[in-house]
């Protein structure tokens, strides 16, 4: 599972030297090619303002282009430095709704050395969409991005 996807993404990362363009291509690829990855975005930290800024995404546009640290699943991950898998967003008191169709979410931090500098955020319109396989897949993508650009 995800073997061919990793190969494709690795080729993109290796041939693209512009971070924003690379992130956009990864978002588009994941959103269009992996069932249940209904919205894919990369947020990066603005430590001065203590917020996340949306850099690239694919899916329905969101008003949540800036998220305060601690707010929502993304904001929780920014503070904890941990990945988060939510099987049912309706049961999360701190959830920020970007789209009424979203049922589950996964957030995986992106590290520069040991510093959390951003994250990949994926929403699904399916309950319990994400597993440990998705988590490992997304960690690998973030690791490749970090090694190339940071």
Image: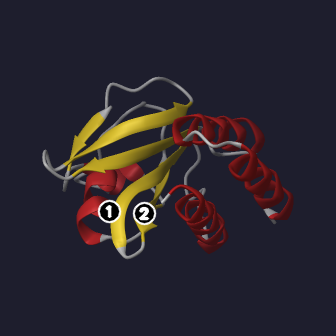
Element on which disc 2 rests: strand
- In the rendered view, tell whether residue 143 sits above or below residue 122: below
| Pointer 1 local density, CA inside 10 Å: few below 14, some 14–19, many at least 20 | many
Q: Which residue is mark 2?
A: 109
Of marks 1 and 2, the one in the foreground = 2
Name the residue at 57% across, 42% down: 23
**In this picture, residue 86 sits left or right of residue 63:** right
**In this picture, residue 128 sits left or right of residue 8:** left
* Label 1–label 2 contact, CB within 8 A: yes
Tell me where residue 25 sits by quadrant.
top right
Q: Is residue 84 in view from this perspective?
A: no
What numbered label is drawn on residue 30?
Answer: none
Residue most extreme to the right: 4
- In the rendered view, tell whether residue 65 sits above or below residue 95: above
- In the rendered view, tell whether residue 38 sits above or below residue 130: above
Name the residue at 32% across, 54% down: 73
Element on which disc 1 rests: helix
**In this picture, residue 135 sits left or right of residue 93:** right
Q: Which residue is mark 1?
A: 77
The percent coordinates of residue 122 (x first, y second) are 52, 48
């Amino acid at each position: 599972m995800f073997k061919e996807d990793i190969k494709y993404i690795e080729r993109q990362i290796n041939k693209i030297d512009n971070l924003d363009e690379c992130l956009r291509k990864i978002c588009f690829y994941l959103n269009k090619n992996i069932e249940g990855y209904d919205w894919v975005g990369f947020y990066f930290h603005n430590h001065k303002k203590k917020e996340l800024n949306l850099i690239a995404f694919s899916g329905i546009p969101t008003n949540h282009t800036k998220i305060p640290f601690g707010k929502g699943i993304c904001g929780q991950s920014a503070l904890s430095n941990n990945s988060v898998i939510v099987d049912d967003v309706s049961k999360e008191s701190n959830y920020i709704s970007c789209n009424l169709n979203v049922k589950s979410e996964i957030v995986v931090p992106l590290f520069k050395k040991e510093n959390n500098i951003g994250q990949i955020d994926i929403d699904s319109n399916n309950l319990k969409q994400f597993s440990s396989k998705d988590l490992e897949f997304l960690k690998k993508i973030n690791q490749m991005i970090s090694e190339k650009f940071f």
